[in-house]
Image: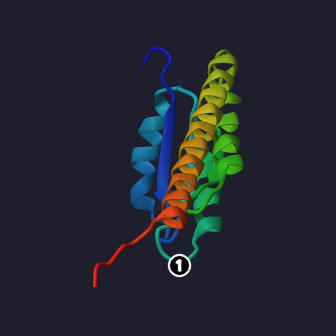
Protein backbone atom coordinates (compact mmCIF):
# COMPACT_ATOMS: atom_id res chain seq x y z
CA UNK A 1 0.00 0.00 0.00
CA UNK A 2 3.02 2.29 0.30
CA UNK A 3 2.47 5.15 -2.12
CA UNK A 4 -0.58 3.55 -3.71
CA UNK A 5 -3.76 5.29 -4.72
CA UNK A 6 -7.18 4.04 -5.73
CA UNK A 7 -8.94 4.72 -9.01
CA UNK A 8 -12.41 3.21 -8.95
CA UNK A 9 -14.18 3.05 -12.32
CA UNK A 10 -17.94 2.55 -12.69
CA UNK A 11 -20.26 2.29 -15.68
CA UNK A 12 -22.45 5.40 -15.55
CA UNK A 13 -24.89 3.83 -18.01
CA UNK A 14 -25.90 1.28 -15.34
CA UNK A 15 -28.00 2.30 -12.33
CA UNK A 16 -26.31 2.68 -8.97
CA UNK A 17 -27.20 -0.01 -6.43
CA UNK A 18 -26.49 -0.55 -2.73
CA UNK A 19 -24.57 -3.73 -3.60
CA UNK A 20 -21.56 -1.52 -4.47
CA UNK A 21 -21.38 0.07 -1.02
CA UNK A 22 -19.54 -2.76 0.76
CA UNK A 23 -16.77 -2.73 -1.83
CA UNK A 24 -16.47 1.06 -1.72
CA UNK A 25 -16.44 1.05 2.09
CA UNK A 26 -13.53 -1.41 2.12
CA UNK A 27 -11.63 0.85 -0.28
CA UNK A 28 -12.32 3.84 1.95
CA UNK A 29 -10.96 1.96 4.98
CA UNK A 30 -7.55 1.75 3.30
CA UNK A 31 -7.13 5.48 3.87
CA UNK A 32 -5.37 5.79 0.53
CA UNK A 33 -5.91 8.74 -1.83
CA UNK A 34 -8.85 7.85 -4.03
CA UNK A 35 -10.63 8.96 -7.17
CA UNK A 36 -13.75 7.58 -8.80
CA UNK A 37 -14.26 7.75 -12.56
CA UNK A 38 -17.70 7.45 -14.14
CA UNK A 39 -17.39 5.93 -17.61
CA UNK A 40 -20.39 5.52 -19.90
CA UNK A 41 -20.37 2.25 -21.83
CA UNK A 42 -23.88 2.61 -23.25
CA UNK A 43 -26.31 5.50 -23.88
CA UNK A 44 -28.23 5.50 -20.57
CA UNK A 45 -27.06 8.09 -18.03
CA UNK A 46 -27.18 7.45 -14.29
CA UNK A 47 -24.29 9.84 -13.56
CA UNK A 48 -26.11 11.91 -10.95
CA UNK A 49 -26.97 8.82 -8.89
CA UNK A 50 -23.37 7.65 -9.10
CA UNK A 51 -21.95 11.08 -8.23
CA UNK A 52 -24.05 11.32 -5.07
CA UNK A 53 -23.01 7.83 -3.94
CA UNK A 54 -19.36 8.02 -4.94
CA UNK A 55 -18.93 11.36 -3.21
CA UNK A 56 -19.42 9.62 0.16
CA UNK A 57 -16.55 7.19 -0.42
CA UNK A 58 -13.99 8.91 -2.67
CA UNK A 59 -12.09 12.18 -2.37
CA UNK A 60 -12.69 13.06 -6.02
CA UNK A 61 -15.30 12.02 -8.60
CA UNK A 62 -14.91 12.70 -12.33
CA UNK A 63 -16.79 11.68 -15.47
CA UNK A 64 -14.40 10.23 -18.03
CA UNK A 65 -14.82 8.17 -21.18
CA UNK A 66 -11.39 7.37 -22.64
CA UNK A 67 -12.93 6.42 -25.98
CA UNK A 68 -14.48 9.87 -26.49
CA UNK A 69 -11.97 12.26 -24.98
CA UNK A 70 -9.23 14.40 -26.40
CA UNK A 71 -5.70 14.96 -25.14
CA UNK A 72 -6.71 17.89 -22.91
CA UNK A 73 -9.29 15.75 -21.12
CA UNK A 74 -6.77 12.95 -20.57
CA UNK A 75 -4.33 15.47 -19.11
CA UNK A 76 -7.09 16.94 -16.93
CA UNK A 77 -7.66 13.53 -15.34
CA UNK A 78 -3.93 13.16 -14.69
CA UNK A 79 -3.83 16.64 -13.13
CA UNK A 80 -6.78 15.68 -10.92
CA UNK A 81 -4.83 12.66 -9.72
CA UNK A 82 -1.93 14.92 -8.74
CA UNK A 83 -4.27 16.84 -6.43
CA UNK A 84 -5.03 13.72 -4.39
CA UNK A 85 -1.65 13.73 -2.67
CA UNK A 86 0.92 16.54 -2.56
CA UNK A 87 3.83 14.15 -3.12
CA UNK A 88 2.30 13.13 -6.45
CA UNK A 89 2.33 16.59 -8.05
CA UNK A 90 5.90 16.49 -9.42
CA UNK A 91 5.78 12.86 -10.65
CA UNK A 92 2.40 13.37 -12.31
CA UNK A 93 3.60 16.55 -14.01
CA UNK A 94 6.61 14.60 -15.30
CA UNK A 95 4.24 11.88 -16.54
CA UNK A 96 2.13 14.49 -18.31
CA UNK A 97 5.21 15.81 -20.11
CA UNK A 98 6.11 12.26 -21.20
CA UNK A 99 2.53 11.70 -22.36
CA UNK A 100 2.56 14.92 -24.39
CA UNK A 101 5.94 14.01 -25.92
CA UNK A 102 4.61 10.54 -26.80
CA UNK A 103 1.53 12.02 -28.49
CA UNK A 104 3.71 14.45 -30.43
CA UNK A 105 5.89 11.56 -31.64
CA UNK A 106 2.79 9.65 -32.75
CA UNK A 107 1.52 12.68 -34.69
CA UNK A 108 4.92 13.11 -36.35
CA UNK A 109 5.03 9.43 -37.31
CA UNK A 110 1.51 9.61 -38.71
CA UNK A 111 2.25 12.73 -40.75
CA UNK A 112 5.43 11.13 -42.14
CA UNK A 113 3.52 8.01 -43.18
CA UNK A 114 0.74 10.06 -44.78
CA UNK A 115 3.31 12.14 -46.65
CA UNK A 116 5.04 8.99 -47.87
CA UNK A 117 1.73 7.55 -49.08
CA UNK A 118 0.84 10.77 -50.93
CA UNK A 119 4.26 10.93 -52.61
CA UNK A 120 4.04 7.25 -53.58
CA UNK A 121 0.51 7.69 -54.90
CA UNK A 122 1.29 10.81 -56.92
CA UNK A 123 4.50 9.45 -58.39
CA UNK A 124 3.17 5.98 -59.17
CA UNK A 125 3.45 5.03 -62.82
CA UNK A 126 1.67 2.02 -64.22
CA UNK A 127 2.97 0.61 -67.53
CA UNK A 128 1.01 -1.78 -69.65
CA UNK A 129 2.42 -3.49 -72.71
CA UNK A 130 -0.03 -3.92 -75.61
- Check the image and report above or below for 112 versus 31: below
Residue at the image position 53 percent from the left and 26 percent from the top: 32
Residue at the image position 69 percent from the left and 37 percent from the top: 80
Colouring: rainbow
* Local crowd size for mark 1, using a 10 Å CA cut-off: few (<14), some (14–19), many (≥20): few
Q: Position of residue 107 (x, y in %)?
A: 60, 46
Q: Is 130 positioned to the left or the right of 2 in the image?
A: left
What secondary structure is marked by label 1? loop
Front-most of 28 and 107?
107
Q: How many marks?
A: 1
Quarter of the N terminus within the rendering: top left
- Is residue 113 among the parts visible in the rendering? yes
Instruction: Name the residue furthest front.
Output: 130
- Is residue 66 among the parts visible in the rendering? no
Query: Residue 79 lies in what quarter of the image?
Result: top right
Quarter of the C terminus within the rendering: bottom left
Residue at the image position 48 percent from the left and 74 percent from the top: 42
Q: Position of residue 59 (x, y in %)?
A: 64, 38
Q: Is 49 positioned to the left or the right of 128 in the image?
A: right
| Residue on which the image places disc 1 | 43
Q: Position of residue 93 (x, y in %)?
A: 68, 25
- Check the image and report above or below for 97 versus 1: below
Front-most of 128 and 15?
128
Q: Position of residue 65 (x, y in %)?
A: 56, 59
Q: Is 41 positioned to the left or the right of 56 in the image?
A: left
Instruction: Name the residue furthest bottom.
Output: 130
- Check the image and report above or below for 89 versus 118: above
Query: Residue 27 lies in what quarter of the image?
Result: top left
Residue at the image position 46 percent from the left and 45 percent from the top: 24
Query: Residue 17 lies in what quarter of the image?
Result: bottom left
Front-most of 74 and 58?
74
Amino acid sequence: MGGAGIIYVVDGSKPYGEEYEAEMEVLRWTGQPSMALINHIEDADYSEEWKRALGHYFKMVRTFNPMQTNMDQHISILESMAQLKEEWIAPVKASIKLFERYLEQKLNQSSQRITRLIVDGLSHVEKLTL
